[in-house]
Image: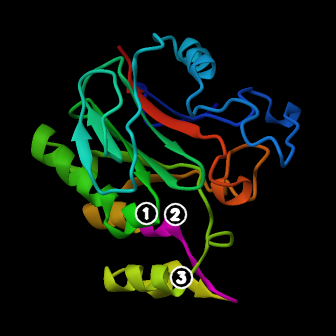
Amino acid sequence: MRTYDLGPDVVAFSTLRCGSVDPGRQVVRADMTYNGFNQWRASGNRLRLAQQLGIGADDFVVPHQTHSDHVAYVSQPGQPDDVDAVFTDVAGLCICVSTADCIPVLLHDPRHHAVAAIHAGWRGTVARIVRQTVQAMQARLGTQAADLRAVIGPGISLQAFEVGQEVYDAFLAAGFPMERIAVQRDKWHIDLWEANRLQLEEAGVQDIQMAGVCTYTHPDLYYSARRLGIQAGRILNGIMLRA
């Protein structure tokens, strides 16, 4: 798995398609959308991941995502329905979002010992789910944005994310600075990394890490629904307070 440094009190990661510390060993074939360390409906792989993290197979929160802007506080394992961002202050509970091109954002509040995992596809990004998650943490836990440490994980890049006019218009109507997040080639391309980074910055988050890895152009490392089809496997992006 790919791990991120968000402080000594947390474990933060994105799983790899190969499920190995040596991604070069994975052989990817276009017809094998589920090969490797798939974390979508893959109980055997979920158990392997739990073993790597040193937790139980039932210590995960993996919401049923609907490309909404819904944010939920969680305190126990499970699969909350119609939720695309979760946060907790419970140690040992691994909160996750699954992705296969959409943008994962992980947050750590070291002052209040809290973490969040956010799934930001283009609809969630337009709805500013990242900003809403920061606000939800502030309201429930007293989080201050300036204390947060954030990572924007692997997802589709501007170069690969070609969109129709209706998607461009949705970002424009939502007030995004299009000169910073969009370029026009044959069609419009949107930079979801930058759109979510701007949300963090505007909320007051100062410590922002960027994985900078495109899932579409690195199918040897990550699943990509746009490249492999909607039935492609999924990676998990998770964060957990150490018990």
x, y percentage for residue 242? 38, 18
Mark number, residue 197: 1
Residue type, label 3: Ala
Residue type, label 2: Trp
Q: Is residue 79 above or below residue 31?
A: above
Give the Cα separation between the discs numbered 1 and 2.
6 Å
| Residue at figure coordinates x 47%, y 79% from the top left | 167
Which of the pair 208/76 is nearer the observer?
76
Reading the image, the residue beneath label 3 is 182
**Labels 1 and 2 touching (C-beta < 8 A):** yes
Residue type, label 1: Arg
Check disc 2: other Cα within 10 Å, few if <14, some if 14-19, many if 20+: many
Mark number, residue 236: none
Q: Is residue 147 above or below residue 102?
A: above
| Residue at figure coordinates x 42%, y 63% from the top left | 196
Q: Earlier in the sequence, mark 2 or mark 3?
A: 3
